[in-house]
Amino acid sequence: MKTAQKYRIFAERFFRDGQFENDVTVTVENGVVTAIEHGRAADADRAYAYVTPGLIDNHIHGGDGCSVYGSTPEEMETWLVHLAEAGTSGVMLAPSGQPERIRKSLENLRVVMEHQKEGKAGGALVLGAHLEGPFISAEKPGAMEAVIPPSVETFRQMTEGYEDIVREMTIAPENPGAAEVIAYLRQRGIRVLAGHTNSTYDEAMTAFANGVGALCHTFNAARSIHHREPGVVTAALTCPEVYCEMIGDLAHLHPGTMHLIRHCKGRERVMLISDAVMTTHLPDGVYGRVEVKNGENRVVGLGCLSGGGCYTAKSVGNLVKIGMDFSDAVMAAAVNPARWIGADTEPAVGKHVFLTGWNKDFTPACTHIGENTYVCH
């Protein structure tokens, strides 16, 4: 829904600089914040229990029948509107698979990003691409099918012409050739995550020292913790500067494990992701190699989870439900993902509006993105 050129948002609780402030009014003109003022605005056009920075999902493959692999740019643009309606403001779309499939996905993402820049498409803003593979471990593939030895030449061929939209890559750092790829990516400012990895603790510590800055969907598709071989997860949890992705659908991680991640990483190094896939939000049934049952996506015949079961806003509610503070959930879903990719989405005068309004029950009420407003519920 297109917004008026000027409108005012009132928040009973307004989140900025890591904390909530009481009774704040935000004025928006032509998609830009022109004032942030304390005080209860009786004439506000919209009023919410909470207003936070817009939610950023740095790891999402699709949803509602759409995927970054097989859908057209037009189909993705329709889906991005639905995603904004579900509370997500910005996304790093995550191609995976064989190099030719990743390359085709990047071609389509380029079209979508150009359409959004030109004002021809709206919805959740595509901030870039997060390549999940194909340089992953054959021992920890999860639901991934493509496993290719890492090489700089393969990466160049896969991304030539699209280098500027690739902002993240997940890689198994223990594989021969991975160190060279990691160095190449870091030289170009691409964020690198360890993921789908069987790294030992020492291998992971070396990778983190050499520029790997995050762990992809922590605990999932990674070597498990053992008291005599702590592995990559322990390395990530104990390295202060390393970010940890966390899927918040309550299927990929037990609530106790989610509290462990929060306890180890603090409130500034957890990134809540959806890892949503084409079948996320579809009715129960079998869709190709994936079966959806009770909101979970599993590979037919294998039983392993295949992508997250909900979008990020619902995961925020899940964190609150298991006892986490809402402000910590906001950090994980909005602030930290933006910081990790180098995006500045903190609300301030003179910046494009990038906000999520919330109801008292921690469900999204509305998403404000630039000149577009999307009603969520």
Image (cartoon, rainbow, N blue to C red):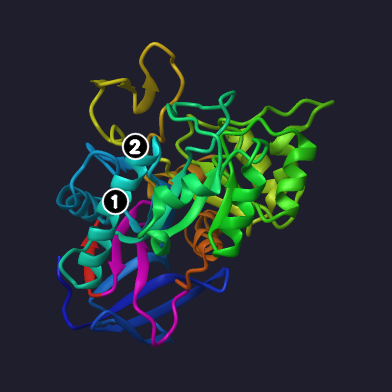
Depth check, front residue: 165 or 19: 165
The spot of residue 212 in percent (x, y) is 65, 52
> Total label count?
2
| Front position among marks 1 and 2 | 2
Depth check, front residue: 166 or 315: 166
Which range is magenta?
346-370
* Left or right, residue 42 beside residue 349: left
Query: Mark 1 highlights which residue?
Result: 86
Residue at x 27%, y 63% (from the top left corner) = 113
326 vs 357: above or below:
above
367 within the magenta span: yes
10 vs 217: above or below:
below
Depth check, front residue: 201 or 350: 201
| Secondary structure of the residue carrying numbered label 2 | loop
* Left or right, residue 369 beside residue 242: left
The spot of residue 92 in percent (x, y) is 40, 54
* Left or right, residue 140 beside residue 92: right
Query: Mark 2 highlights which residue?
Result: 277
The spot of residue 75 in percent (x, y) is 16, 47
Amino acid type, mark 1: Ala
Residue at x 36%, y 43% (from the top left corner) = 102
243 within the magenta span: no
